[in-house]
């Protein structure tokens, strides 16, 4: 008894709560040394600090706990409390609108992207998760994807007949079909092996994922197409979140806001560094498509917008076009 009081007094003196600590398991599939990996660690630190130790965030990187599909199920079941899946992975959950982010060439740059992720369209999309028992807290940036393969990818014809690993998005399936490729959905954690063993010929990813998963060891060519965006929604189990007392939830949200600012600050730089490392490795030939080659790719992929408009929701799509100025019919 005496001992307990001494410990409690010591904890109080250290500014820590004597109540049981809330554990948040935060699972993700990428390396620790990526925009998402770093931002989740930043969040864990901030959460401990701002809740004065009432919350401990345990980050599990690199699919250590779950792969893509399993982690969504684990979140809904409450086996983990927090995830940051790519926006391309919400389709299987039945929230297809997020696949609008996968539409080829829809964002020219981060400024356009942020009009959506930091504006009313992005906020409205997050509320669609609630009926699935999920609360969306924030969007974290990663970057623009480039295609890779074991043979050069310059003209549209070069893409034809190759098998590409994609994330579980119908829009991405159509994007690959639009250039005559064969899409194959494979978990992120199994991609390196699929490339290594030749199950697929190529893939698409931002440089940060490409480099940290060592894809440069098993892909001879990387074409800097920047044809699509890959980023994240940070999500929590809704019941868990709503059951948190306000004096925990408020500082936790503050920690999330600070982590979001941090994530979006480092994302470009992390991708630049990763690309420089791929270059330095000398294992992958990096090609920058000419303006004509990139335009040809854009034109070849433009029909995906019309084809998938019903799936992602015409209203959502119009709102994005309005904010960004993209018009596929003008291509
Ligand atoms: C992928 O599967 O390629 C990405 O979604 C991985 C990630 O989380 O960045």
Image (tube, grey):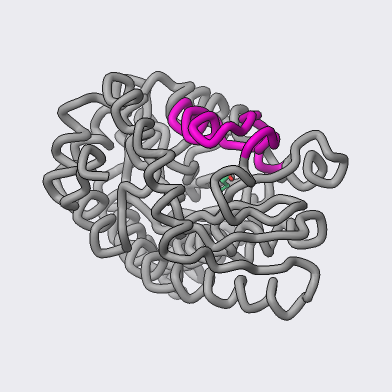
Left or right, residue 2 beside residue 226: right
Question: On screen, 184 above or below 56?
Answer: above
Viewer-nearest residue: 113 or 180: 180
Number of numbered callouts drawn: 0
- The part of the image, by quadrant, that contains residue 90 is top left
Outermost right residue: 197
Q: Quadrant of the C terminus?
A: top left
Question: Which percent across, then down, holds residue 136?
Answer: 32, 40
Residue 104 belongs to magenta span:
no
Which span of residues is magenta-colored? 160-189
Question: On screen, 129 above or below 292?
Answer: above
Left or right, residue 246 beside residue 27: left
Question: On screen, 52 above or below 177?
Answer: below
Residue drawn at the location 35% of the way across and 38% of the way down: 302
Question: Which percent across, then down, holds residue 241?
Answer: 35, 38
Residue drawn at the location 48% of the way across and 43% of the way down: 86
Instruction: Kindly tell me whether residue 194 is visible in this rendering.
Output: yes
Instruction: Kindly tell me whether residue 18 is visible in this rendering.
Output: no
Question: Which percent across, then down, holds residue 101?
Answer: 35, 42
Residue 178 belongs to magenta span:
yes
Question: Which percent across, then down, holds residue 93?
Answer: 44, 22
Left or right, residue 190 beside residue 17: right
- The part of the image, by quadrant, that contains residue 259 is bottom left
Residue drawn at the location 49% of the way across and 38% of the way down: 81
Left or right, residue 28 beside residue 221: left
Viewer-nearest residue: 311 or 262: 311
Residue drawn at the location 32% of the way across and 46% of the way down: 137
């Amino acid at each position: 008894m005496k001992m307990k009081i001494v410990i409690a007094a010591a904890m109080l003196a250290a500014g820590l709560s004597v109540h049981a600590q809330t554990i948040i398991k935060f699972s993700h599939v990428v390396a620790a040394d990526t925009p998402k990996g770093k931002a989740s660690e930043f969040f864990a630190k901030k959460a401990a600090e701002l809740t004065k130790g009432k919350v401990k965030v345990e980050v599990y990187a690199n699919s250590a706990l779950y792969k893509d599909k399993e982690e969504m199920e684990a979140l809904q079941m409450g086996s983990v409390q927090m995830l940051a899946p790519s926006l391309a992975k919400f389709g299987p959950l039945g929230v297809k609108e997020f696949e609008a982010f996968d539409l080829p060439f829809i964002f020219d740059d981060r400024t356009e992207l942020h009009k959506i992720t930091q504006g009313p369209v992005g906020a409205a999309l997050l509320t669609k998760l609630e009926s699935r028992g999920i609360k969306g807290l924030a969007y974290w940036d990663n970057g623009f994807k480039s295609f890779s393969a074991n043979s050069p990818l310059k003209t549209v014809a070069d893409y034809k007949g190759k098998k590409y690993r994609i994330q579980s998005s119908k829009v991405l399936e159509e994007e690959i079909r639009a250039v005559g490729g064969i899409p194959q959905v494979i978990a992120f954690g199994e991609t390196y092996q699929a490339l290594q063993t030749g199950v697929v010929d190529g893939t698409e990813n931002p440089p940060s994922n490409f480099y940290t998963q060592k894809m440069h060891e098993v892909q001879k060519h990387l074409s800097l197409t920047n044809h699509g965006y890959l980023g994240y929604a940070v999500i929590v189990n809704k019941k868990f979140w709503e059951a948190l007392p306000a004096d925990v939830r408020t500082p936790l949200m503050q920690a999330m806001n600070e982590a979001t600012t941090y994530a979006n600050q480092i994302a470009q730089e992390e991708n630049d560094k990763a690309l420089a490392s791929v270059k330095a490795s000398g294992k992958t030939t990096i090609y920058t498509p000419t303006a004509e080659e990139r335009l040809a790719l854009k034109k070849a992929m433009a029909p995906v917008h019309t084809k998938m408009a019903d799936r992602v929701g015409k209203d959502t799509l119009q709102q994005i076009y309005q904010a960004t100025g993209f018009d596929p019919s003008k291509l």
